[in-house]
Amino acid sequence: MKYILMNIPMSKATHEGRKTNTRRPIKGVDGYEFESMAVNLRSGDKHAVFSNDGHIKQIKPKYQVGETIWVREPVKITNIINRPRHENSEVVFKYKADDKKEKIPLFKFERLKDSDGFLPKWLRNHKGIPNGCIKEMARIFLKVTNVIVERLQDISDEDIKKEGLDDDPRIVNCEIEGSITSPKVKREEYIILWNKTASK
């Protein structure tokens, strides 16, 4: 099963049901123009078709319609409960989106040991997991219902809302002059948020 990375605000919006759309950049198509979406009749997979001076390039989106994917959201290890029988030891962690704490058996991390048999430093030192939670910690599972291609600047006001940004504090507390209910302000804030997220 594939995963999708989300930062804290986007994980929170998805968990609360406010975010139902997500946008991901397509790489390797600089200089090409988008032509159409093609469906492989045998597999049902969608392909984005691009052209450049007679050259055709087909890109298969990472996520396909019908797939279920899990969200790799930010978490932090808060404690390790060691018990006499190692297999019963547990790791306590919290989701950074809402500080909810959960436990997971320590043996779930065995596959992450290095060549010397040591568990990761972030686990031993009670830190955040780089690039988000492992699959065994996932609590958000999404089913892909549609895949489209469009220019980022063509996003509609309705889709900005579906990105889960209405209640994002970076938008509610924005410093751009004007009412937050204004579509223009939301669009400008979405551009700022995208640039901050995509540049990381």
Image (cartoon, rainbow, N blue to C red):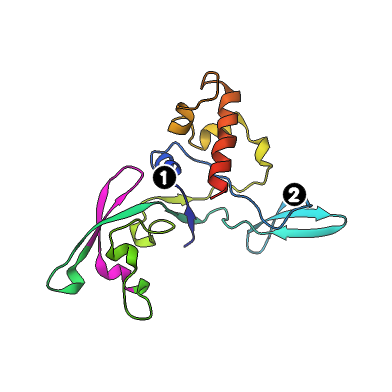
Looking at the image, is mark 1 or mark 2 earlier in the sequence?
1
Identified at 68% across, 36% down, the residue is 154
How many marks on residues?
2
Q: Position of residue 145 (x, y in %)?
A: 54, 47
Q: Position of residue 144 (x, y in %)?
A: 52, 50
Q: Nearer the viewer, residue 45 or 19?
A: 19
Looking at the image, which residue sits at the far right? 53
Q: Is residue 173 above or below residue 40?
A: above
Q: Position of residue 35 (x, y in %)?
A: 77, 49
Kind of residue sitting beneath label 2: Ser
Q: Nearer the viewer, residue 178 or 94?
A: 178
Residue corresponding to mark 1? 8
* Residue 168 in view in this figure: no
Q: Position of residue 125 (x, y in %)?
A: 28, 62
Looking at the image, which residue sits at the far left? 84
Q: In what element is the residue under mark 1?
A: helix
Q: Residues within 10 Å of mark 2 (few under 14, many from 20)?
A: some
98 inside magenta stretch? yes
In front of the other: label 1 or label 2? 1
Residue corresponding to mark 2? 36
Identified at 63% across, 35% down, the residue is 155
Point out the stretch of residues depicted in magenta: 91-110
Answer left or right for 31 relative to 110: right
Q: Nearer the viewer, residue 184 or 175?
A: 175
